Amino acid sequence: MQSQDYYIPAAAMGAALAFKVPSLVRAWRDPLLRAVCALLAMAGLVFFFAAPPTIAAVNRMTGIRNFSAPLVYSLLSAFSASCLILIVNWRGGPPEQTRRISRRWITAYSIEVVALIVLFALGKTPVERLRDLDTYYANTPYIREMIVLYLVALTVAGVSMNVMCWRWALQVHGWLRAGLLIIVFGYLFNLAYLVAKFSAVFARWGGHDLDYLSSDVAPTLASWGAQISAVGFCLPLACQRFADSWSTWATYRQLGPLWHVLHAGAPRHHRPVHISWWSSAELRVTQRESDIHDGMLGLYPYFDAKVRAAAYEAALAAGSDPLLAHAEADAMMVTEAVRARAADPLGKIVNSAEASGSTPPEGPRDLVRMSVVLRQSPVVAAARRRAATRSESDSHERTR
């Protein structure tokens, strides 16, 4: 692998982490978000510090030959722990159980990292090796144990990840299953990386030379595996975010007909407050719902229970189910109230003796349903046409 093969993935992981930092600052207590950020940070650090130029620079700066070896091995172990912790938090469950399992993985890999440092301190590595330290020192006391320890730790993490992700993938569907299967596929490359590393080390123990498996083949497999797994981790989260955003914008658009009906003829002091064009979809939906509720409060004196009851019966007769019929009846009552207010510019309350004591249904789902039937219900459309014809007749009478 060339140096750019290390630095490009490191930069990509750093950019993804920078994108997540604002969310992390806002929701620091979210364990899933912390696990995602830890994973991105560890992956970026592994690629950066495993690059041969960085290895040489770190050795030179510390003044210790091959100091980068335990550093990179420790980062690899931390990355493995981060993957396991992310899966544990991603899958969810009782919070105390999730925290307990996470702490166990953190404790186990922390002990392993300490052992790596101790073994390196006890061993001797007088010759700097930038690419083939695993095989060059495969028979050196203590360094041999350090190499085997970090490979075993990575193997445990890789097998555990594949087992957990595969079992979970069999229980879920959609983008989450796709992401988990991609992670499993990516970790197959990581397992192949470990096979290559172990093969090269075992070959050294047997007096043979398969160093190319460790220095050339294994890094390429690790890079592919890490990047594929990163896609698997990000895909469900990104798709869920996109789906949530799409749903929010859909709700905003669906509320449009009701919002326009309520505010088309509203008095100037009842006009909605404009928000900036860069406002989030969630804020726009909240603002639109608030405007609709405010508009309905202004129409309250004009709500007529007879209109609502007649519209409900007509909707049932037309084949609507009770839930839809209620929405059509509410929509018709709102439409008639808007017409009544327009015909009463001085503010006289019409039909006050028959005014309904009920209020419009609460909650965004009811509002969305009312808004949709305003545009799609044939019962509401027919009633609105009759109301428009009646309004024109009344206008002609007044002009005479």
Image (cartoon, grey):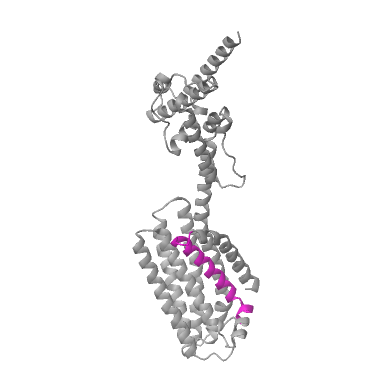
Q: Is residue 110 magenta?
A: no
Location of residue 89 in the rendering, given as x and y in whole percent from the top left corner: 42, 61
Q: Taking 63 as reference, is 99 above or below it?
A: above
Q: Is residue 159 visible?
A: yes
Q: Quadrant of the C terminus?
A: top right
Location of residue 79 in the rendering, given as x and y in whole percent from the top left corner: 49, 71
Location of residue 385 in the rendering, given as x and y in whole percent from the top left corner: 53, 18
Q: Is residue 306 visible?
A: no
Q: Residue furthest top?
A: 400
Location of residue 73 in the rendering, given as x and y in whole percent from the top left corner: 51, 78
Q: Residue at x 46, y 35 (%)?
A: 367
Query: Which of 311/116 is in front?
Result: 311
Left or right of 222, for residue 163: left
Left or right of 59, for residue 36: left
Q: Taking 76 as reference, is 181 above or below it?
A: above
- The image quadrant that residue 169 belongs to is bottom left
Magenta part, dominant SS: helix
User: How many numbered circles are shown?
Assistant: 0
Query: Which of 120/98 is in front?
Result: 98
Query: Which of 382/351 is in front?
Result: 351
Q: Is residue 35 magenta?
A: yes
Q: Which residues are magenta?
A: 27-55
Q: Residue at x 37, y 65 (%)?
A: 99
Q: Quadrant of the N terminus?
A: bottom right
